[in-house]
Image: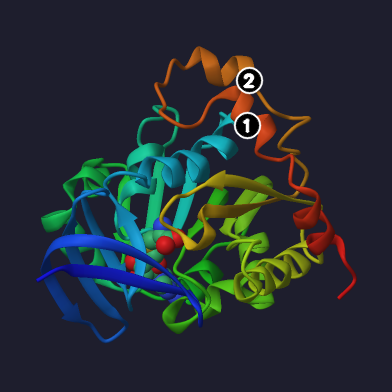
Amino acid sequence: MELWFSEKNTETCKFSIKVKEQIYSEQTPFQKIAFFESYDFGRFFTLDGLMMVNEKDEFIYHDMIVHVPMAVNPDIKKVLVIGGGDGGTVRELSRYKSIETIHLVDIDERVVRLCQKYLPQTACGFDDPRVKTYFEDGVAFVKKNTSYYDLILVDSTDPIGPGEGLFTKDFYNDCYNALNENGILINQHESPYFENYAKEMKKAHVKLKSIFDVCKVYQFHMPTYASGHWLFGFASKGLDPIKDHRKDKWESLGLKTKYYNSGIHLGAFLLPTYVEEKLNSPD
Ligand code: SAM
């Protein structure tokens, strides 16, 4: 018998991966978590049937969420990660000796515990003593501090289920207030290709633009996310990802990365025409 994991990109388009076995699954109060062993992507886990992280392409997502802002402000000391329960984002952050505090807030402790068991490649990030983990809703957590963080990374699920609140204008406003004057917010910006995802991309961009002085979008290639074309938002109170790119400083740190480099940093902000048009259209 053949076993396949399929994720619906639209009602009429699916992405499928042949799996060797399903290792584990559990329904938590927040979502259904499942772990699989596959042929092409190694071990992977899903939340409510959607691909989250796999061993083969996670480095792309985690390089791009972390190293882009760190190369704009290499003096970042206090970081908040919202979501990110697999640990991949904190793993990359903990490579910077200059960072003093990393707060990770995931609504679901089971994601962290199960990734520690089944996905040590990413969950090793939790071993760093600078990482403090909180299990609560990021929407409420971000209200607790004003002008505190240098960087907030929203490493969330899509805007359905528990992740919905992480795409609202109120939440982005609270992130603005929680950041200090050089603060940067990176958020999940979904994908421009399929209409259902592009709608969320546009909505997030419009909300962020009404709050932050600098509001850009950057792209990367993520083979296992819908259409393979994925985006992050870069919003800040002043720092510009291109004009303030500290290429030499970042390169002097000597960090070895598999996807991110200084050329990709610049190129990622150059978007295809249809994406620019959608982001800037009045509707
Ligand atoms: N890289 C992934 C992606 O884009 O598919 C995201 C992975 S990470 C596992 C997403 C995490 O966000 C999950 O662990 C989930 O529990 C967490 N999450 C969802 N809604 C949340 C909320 N409101 N507050 C904090 N964490 C939340």
Whole-percent x and y of residue 108? 29, 73
The vertical placement of 67 against 41, above or below, is above
Whole-percent x and y of residue 272? 75, 47
Amino acid at pointer 1: His
Report the residue at 73% width, 64% height from top.
205
Taking the image in four quarters, ligand 1 sits in the one at: bottom left
In-image side of 23 versus 60 (left or right): left
Q: Nearer the viewer, residue 263 or 148?
A: 263
Q: Quadrant of residue 238?
A: top right
Disc 2 crowd rating (10 Å Cα; few below 14, some 14-19, many 20+) is some
> Which residue is label 2 attached to?
247
Would residue 170 be visible to someone looking at this image? yes
Disc 1 crowd rating (10 Å Cα; few below 14, some 14-19, many 20+) is many
The vertical placement of 136 against 224, above or below, is below
| The N terminus - image quarter | bottom left
The vertical placement of 101 against 189, above or below, is above
Q: Which mark is residue 265?
A: 1
Q: Which mark is residue 29?
A: none
| The C terminus - image quarter | bottom right
Q: Nearer the viewer, residue 149 or 216?
A: 216
Amino acid at pointer 2: Lys
For disc 2, does the CB lie below 8 Å from ligand 1? no
Would residue 106 be visible to someone looking at this image? no
Report the residue at 54% width, 72% height from top.
166
Whole-percent x and y of residue 276? 80, 54
Report the residue at 44% width, 15% height from top.
254
Q: Earlier in the sequence, mark 2 or mark 1?
A: 2
Report the residue at 23% width, 82% height from top.
28
Labels 2, 1: front one: 1
Proximity of marks 2 and 1: CB atoms separated by less than 8 Å? yes
In-image side of 46 versus 22 (left or right): right
Secondary structure at numbered mark 1: helix
